[in-house]
Amino acid sequence: MHPAPSIIAFTALSGLGLGLLTYLGFGAVTPRGWSAFLWFGLGYGLTLTGLAASALHLGRPERALRAFSQWRTSWLSREAVLAALALLVLAPHAAGLVFWGRAVPLAGMAGAVLCLATILATSMIYAQLRTVPRWNHWTTPAVFLTAALAGGAILTARVELAELALPWLALTLALHWILGDRQFARSGQSPETATGLGPLGRVRQLEPPHTGPNYLLREMAYVVGRRHRMKLRVIAMILACLIPALLLGLWPGWPGLIPAAFSHLGGMLAARWLFFAEAEHVMGLYYGRR
Amino acid sequence: MTALPPPSLKKLGLVIDLDTCVGCHACVIACKGWNTENYGAPLSDLDPYGAEPEGTFLNRVHSYEVTPESGAPVTVHFPKSCLHCEDAPCVPVCPTGASYKRAEDGIVLVNEDACIGCGLCAWACPYGARELDALVGVMKKCTLCVDRIYNEALPERDREPACVRTCPSGARHFGDLGDPESAVSRLVAERGGIDLMPDLKARPVNKYLPPRPRDRLQEAPPDLAQLCEPGTEGLTGFLGWVDRTLSRF
Amino acid sequence: MHRQPRLDLSPPPSDEMRQTTCYMCACRCGINVHLKEGKVAYIEGNRDHPVNKGVLCAKGSAGIMQHLSPARLRKPLKRVGPRGTGQFQEIEWEEALSLAVSWMQPLRETAPEKLAFFTGRDQSQSLTGWWAQSFGTPNYAAHGGFCSVNMAAAGIYTMGGAFWEFGQADWERTKLFMLFGVAEDHDSNPIKMGIGKLKARGGRMIAVNPIRTGYNAVADDWLAITPGTDGLLILALIHELFRLGRIDLDYLMAYTNAPFLVQGAGEEAGLFLRDAKGTPLVLDRRTGEPAPWDAPGVQPDPAADWQGHKTVLRLMAERYLSPEHAPDAVAERCGIPAPRIRAVAAELARVAFEEEITLNQPWTDFRGQRHEVMKGRPVTFHAMRGISAHSNGFQTCRALHVLQILLGSVEVPGGYRFKPPYPKPVEAHPRPHAGVTPGQPLDGPHLGYPLGPEHLLLNEDGSARRIDKAFTWENPLSAHGLMHMLISNAHAGAPYRIDTLFLYMANMAWNSSMNTSEAMRMLTDTDASGAYVIPHIIYADSYSSEMVAFADLVLPDTTYLERHDCISLLDRPIGEPDAMNDAIRWPVVAPDRDVRGFQSVLLDLGARMRLPGMVKEDGTPRYRDYADYMVNHERRPGVGPLAGWRGEGEGSGRGAPNPDQLDRYIRNGGFYSDHLPQNARFFKPWNAAYQDWAVARGLYDKPAPYLFALYSEPLARFQRAARGLGPHQPPDHLRPQLQHAMDPLPVWYPPLGDSLSDPAEYPLHALTQRPAAMYHSWGSQNPWLRQIHGMNPLYVPKKLWEEHGFQDGDWAFLISPQGRIRIPVARMDALNERTVWTWNAIGKRRGAWALDENAPEAEKGFLLNHLIPELLPDPAGRRRPNADPVTGQAAWFDLRVRLEKAPPGAPSEPAHEAQISPVPKAPKTLARHS
């Protein structure tokens, strides 16, 4: 799948923001006044930036509000509704801490649950797709949730939570990659099933339908070299998990937190790039891809 | 709403005969022409005379080589457009309700006025049947020429999809696959029509008829040699044959 | 929960629909052109049209984009820079026409042969030929010489017609269809429709082609033949039919020259034994004595050997039963296992003789004998360029025609069927003419069919009278001329120099020339004085093609939707087996540029030069324009370009000009059909009812039944000359070539190109095929079609692919003795192991066709033409055309090559410098909506 910067930014930033807001909502930290303003501002800011980035991906962004209508069937619609609800429901809690120095735990808890639900909904947009076997797997929601929780823990400076979440993130990422590598084969799809010509013999593409590029190929038949992928996986793992864990272990205070947060974000951007770039759509079988 | 409607009795679709398709792309261009002028936004082309021309097409013809266990490879031309699936995975994923399946005949359409161009329906489609038009930013797909098949402004004989009307080799058939007695259903039954990627459970309405067995003439049938009178070998044999034949006149 | 929007299910498709004829290839299908607000909106096939019955190919449907192409020329152009660079100045028509007349008129008065007028994909050859004849130059032809003259000429000499416009399979009834060497050459929609019908009925198809694409892909059996060996295969099939006694003896006795006696010795050896009146003789079994073949009650002995004079059938049996024609002897060279050849022969025989079909339709033959039924052998064939574009193509095509005659499947139910105005035997065609008198018309039509050496167009000293050396000993039966030799000969001044080269719709500076880079050089070459070797070049075309850049004067033509045309019975007709048809084009929209239909321009030029037939007695133009000519011109009294609605509107074929004629065509959808009566539909060459029907319509002036020529006596006359007999003698160096190439019975010899290239050094055959969605070079200006074929790789068979270690995206050098090109490669498995191939005419010169200079057509497209010489090497230094020695057909497919891995990356080489585009820049996006 095409690793579109808008979608990578969307999932990485909103995941981080929602992770932060989850901790804030649950009261893992209860900042007050300016520090609450900064923390909630960061959480809202990251989430809204991510959502805005996702709108860039749309062909007709001016119609984005229509996406709130189909929550009964569409995970994308659910995500939009849940994100809006999460930010709304969390608002009294945030406002209470910023302006009055008082938490509104009910709103905070409900908001936090909605944040997690939003992350889950985002992940389900991908995980639901039988057409992309690598995504169509429990590790997709697992990665999205552990990433949000690890990132949120770093941003909330809850080092012990971060040190707990980061190994889980490392584990889910590794599982997503390793198990994901087998997913396409496990899906059983091949040029033979795609064309239905399997009973006649082995199928290979002779000519593509058009010699020029098209939307399908650009969007869904992205090809990334294996060596490049492996290098990026290592980099993503080191930046997203290993370095933050080391930094927080060595300097549990602010000196460790800021570089850890940036390293984690960098690693997650790489991981998200891989999440898309490595994912193969069965449609590519028609074009001799895979 | 993007919930799929209750299954319709009428299931309009195409049956594509891979035994007969010569890969001429006539259907591709007839489709492009009709749908550029009709249903929704025109199908655009970017850089049409340039280094990387790229346009929207609702139907494309692939070419494959199929190599059997033994024997010569076979070339198969393979037209592909929306299969109007019964469990169309592109419909429920749509966040706006733009993508829908018609309750009365099962045609899968995009209401372009409601489409935000998120592209998720194209991701959900196993068959690469949906293309986001780069110029208007909405999803385009085969409409089964819904604006032809019921069109009272067209002569009755023209009320079929543009690709079917134009196909020179008669490799494309249009009809009601929900009716087991329809011509298309009978064709599917006779020729062993197949679904593409059935495991993905989209239950496509369009069916493909596999190529008939190829390259059967490997050895002369032994009975023919026996059928010939003895002595047709060589010139003498031939002259004898001529004599015997003439005597029968 | 489900909700859906309300749709308008009955939008009007257009404001208005106009019916005309397609011009996106040479099929000439009927089209419905839908207009919205006066502009073309959509094109579809005309369901009532005899050619396509509603269907339309990709090119046809994309016609709208051709009509709107940014490459359309806009105004006459006069060259202002060096030739080939594309620097022009737009001028007015009056200046353009005066300039053309100022070049041509003096030639007509002094040396008409110094004008060479050649047309390419011209569909108005009866006009252009008539014009050239009226001008008085012998130098006129169309593109048949590099197209398929072998097929046409072999068919005419053998049976009075070939494939495509001459005839086709009985698609309604045939059960087995065998196709040789056809990609998408011609007759494309009818063949696709026919294959569809055949398959729907459960009929079967065998394809013989090195490459399994297109029609070959849907064939039930595919014979991956090695190029140039089709003749060997066909003769092996004939061997098998003779061996098995599976030839239609009744048919051969009744309708062919099989029982004719051929003189075995003496001065006239090889010619038919004739009586005093000149009638060929057969051996009458009743008397044991020779008798005229058409004597009442004669019972010919088909296998006679009378005093050393043997019948044609006997000669054939002797030749084809010999072991050298056995499947085992040819299998290796053909690349097809012998058992498979035997299986195919057995299948042809089985279907022909065991699945015979009978129509309960009485008919009467030319002998006056009534037949109660029509019996048919449901086996049919079709072939085109793949077998004809070899230097052994004429004989191979002859072999194929003979094969279908031996099976008794020509002009019978289920078999091959002629399309009126065919059949037309060689005797009924004209002879070639080149009699030049300054200021006067030529002494007759340029092109024709020689019956013997006396019909060659040679001067007293043996030199050629035509610039292309057509109808000379080098290629005696060059019925379509040799357009491919035009530039080379004109440049070399061999046989003489010309002054003005006038071309119409022929991309001779690119894909329509062999040895393209050299052709481009010849067009721009100068003499010692600095003047161009070819002093004047006038070119007429609709689009900014590669050839435009080489013209001194460009006459811009209209698009096909803006013009009148006639698809005439006098030209290349569109008959069906059951009907005589013709059609028109008419301006369904007006041009928005200062352009004129070329045919009208030609008539205008003719009138300005006062050419006979083009001016009235008072010197004013006889025809207002081409439309006026189409209605009012008469070739013979009562016979004109259009057959329909003559006289008061009832005349079919014959009748006075009818001023309402074009209206009648337009009201009828742009075409005219006149159907045959039931009893005239088959056995046309011998069917009295057909002959009478054809005479009534002016197709013949009197009934002209004839016999098929298994043995071709005109060829024997040339062979006899080669033996030193007769008053017309070839130069000595051509005697051996004539002796084997002009064999009166089909024969196979290796393609001459094989002697040009050492097969060990150049082990591969290189071919091009026309893709179904592109027609020559035209398609690349069409944004819909160029997305399908924007570049062309060289397809390499799997074995070779692996030997060279190629990977996807690799490039290779392709090398022939002529030169080397660097090109992208791709793998193909369903391909003859000794063959590489690519799609034809995708490669473009930078700057042409209004495309971006970095267009993939220039970056990753290429032409094989660069590798094909127009001349074969000759030890004596003679100019020996790379062509069939019988007809002069360009031997494109003889090309031998070798392959080497090359550094990857565009552009393909040779990379020619860009030409300057004379048309405005093309738009950046397209989203047409009326």
Image (cartoon, coloured by chain):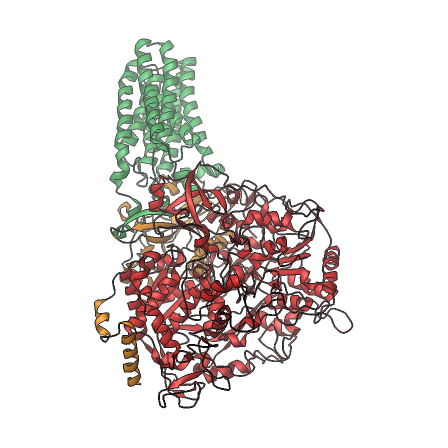
Chain colours: A green, B orange, C red
Picture layout, residue C765 above or below residue C370: above
Question: Which x, y percent locates residue A53?
Answer: 45, 30
Question: Which x, y percent locates residue C882?
Answer: 51, 56
Towards the viewer: A167 or C287: C287
The answer to whether residue A151 is left or right of residue C428 is left
Q: Is residue B14 visible?
A: no
Question: Which x, y percent locates residue C546?
Answer: 59, 49
Towards the viewer: C50 or C741: C741
Picture layout, residue C642 above or below residue A44: below
Picture layout, residue A250 above or below residue C607: above
State the residue lying farthest toward the right: C618
The answer to which quarter of the image holds residue C661 is bottom right
Q: Is residue C126 visible?
A: yes
The answer to whether residue A232 is left or right of residue C593 is left
Towards the viewer: B132 or C762: C762
Question: Which x, y percent locates residue B4?
Answer: 34, 48
How many numbered circles does the render carry?
0
Q: Residue at x 74, y 63 (%)?
A: C110
